[in-house]
Amino acid sequence: MSTRRRTGIVSAVLLTGMTGGLTLVHAVAPDWSRRAGLDVWNVIAAEGELAKATAESEALEMKGDQMHRQIEASESVVGLLVEGRMSLPAATDELLVVNAGRVRFFKNQSFSYPDTATARERVARYAIAKAQQRLSADPIRQREVSSRLWAELPAVNDPAGDPQ
């Protein structure tokens, strides 16, 4: 008898023994075998669960990608605001559009700026805070930009007062 044939016989015996053992375990303790993951007969249900988990994972990844793009766009708007290439009311409008659908973003602004009357004003104050944060290494420029932005804040709730 060749080594190859002996290996095949041993493999067949082991497979038969394992199958018999799993069948016996499932017959004696079906709940335990399911919890232990030995319920190999439930492959179709497991494949369904895997497909569902994969779809959920892909949806979360897409949502994460979208949020990342929204954050990048918001940072770009703040950059234009800091450079003086966009007014605070215009930046506020853009931030409202860019972050539409981000419920937590708007909820966070409500908690951060509870003394504000409108969502526009909360987003404008968020933009001012982001600009100040961006300029934290340059206190002189930070004061200049902050003064300009705080002076533009009243125009946020008055579209006719937008300087640009």
Image (tube, rainbow, N blue to C red):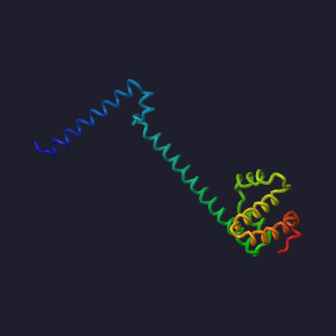
- Residue drawn at x 25%, y 36% as measured from the top left: 14
Question: Looking at the image, which residue sits at the far left?
Answer: 1
Would residue 50 be found to the left or right of residue 41 on screen? right
Depth check: 108 or 15 in front? 108
- Residue drawn at x 77%, y 64% as measured from the top left: 128
User: In x, y percent, where is residue 85?
Assistant: 75, 76
User: In x, y percent, where is residue 146?
Assistant: 79, 67
Quadrant housing residue 23:
top left
Quadrant housing residue 116:
bottom right
Quadrant occupied by the N terminus? top left
Would residue 158 be found to the left or right of residue 2 on screen? right
In this view, 81 is above or below 56: below
User: In x, y percent, where is residue 26?
Assistant: 39, 28
Quadrant occupied by the C terminus? bottom right
- Residue drawn at x 74%, y 64% as measured from the top left: 95
- Residue drawn at x 82%, y 60% as measured from the top left: 121
Would residue 9 be found to the left or right of residue 19 on screen? left
Question: Looking at the image, which residue sits at the far top?
Answer: 28
Depth check: 62 or 55 in front? 62
Would residue 149 be found to the left or right of residue 9 on screen? right
In this view, 147 is above or below 119: below
Depth check: 149 or 102 in front? 149
Quadrant housing residue 142:
bottom right
User: In x, y percent, where is residue 11?
Assistant: 23, 40
User: How many numbered tags mark residues here?
Assistant: 0
